[in-house]
Image (cartoon, rainbow, N blue to C red):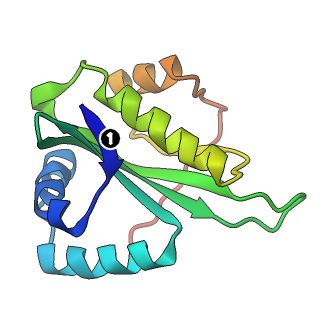
Amino acid sequence: MTVKPITEDDLLALSHLYEELMGIPTNEERMKEVFKSAEASGNYHILGAFHEGELAGSLMGIICLDFVGTCRPFMVIENVIVSDRIRRQGIGKKLMAEIEQIARDKGCAYIIFVSGEKRKEAHIFYEKLGYRDEQAEGFRKHL
C-alpha cells in the first residue's frame, strides 16, 4: 500500500470514494476546477492510499493560518474515507500518520476535525491514534 498526494488523474476514483462516504455523487467537472484551486493555494493536502494500484482511501488536510499568540497555523482534516471493501488493514492509520507529518512539517500547533456523532467505530479509531474528545461543541450551518 502506498500513500501519496492525489493528482488530477485520481479524481474520478476519488469521486467514487466520496460517493461511498457521503451517499451523493460529486460533480466531477466542478471537482477538477476546485482541485486546481486547492493545489495552487499550497494549503490543501489531499492524500490517497493506493492498494494494488487502486485508490482505497483518502483524506484532506487544510493548513489554516492563525493570528493568536505565537500565530502558528493549525490543520483541519476533512473527508476521511477508507473504502468498505478494504477496511481494517491499516490504511486509515497510514493516512492519518502521513497527514500528521505534513502538519508537523508545516509547524502546525494542532489538528482538528469533526466526526459525525453516530460514527462510533470511527471515534474508537481516532482515540487509538491519540485524538481525544475535548468536550468541545461542534457547530455546522448548511448554506
Depth check, front residue: 52 or 56? 52
Of the residues shown, which amino acid type is indicated by label 1?
Val
Instruction: Please state the horizontal and vertical placement of residue 95, each as a whole percent of the image.
Output: 38, 37
Position in image of residue 9 (x %, y %): 16, 65
**Which quadrant of the structure image shows residue 36?**
bottom left
Q: Confirm whether residue 80 shows in the render.
A: no
Q: How many marks?
A: 1
Q: Position of residue 106 (x, y in %)?
A: 65, 55
Answer whether residue 86 is visible to the viewer in this image: yes
- Tell me the quarter of the image containing the C terminus: bottom left
Q: Which is nearer the eye, 72 or 114?
A: 72
The residue depicted at 66 percent of the width and 32 percent of the height is 134
Say which of 3 and 127 sits in front. Answer: 3
**Circle 1 SS class:** strand
Decide: is 15 above or below 134: below
Q: Which residue is mark 1?
A: 3
Check disc 1: other Cα within 10 Å, few if <14, some if 14-19, many if 20+. Answer: some
**Quarter assignment of residue 81:** top left
Q: Is residue 88 left or right of residue 70?
A: left
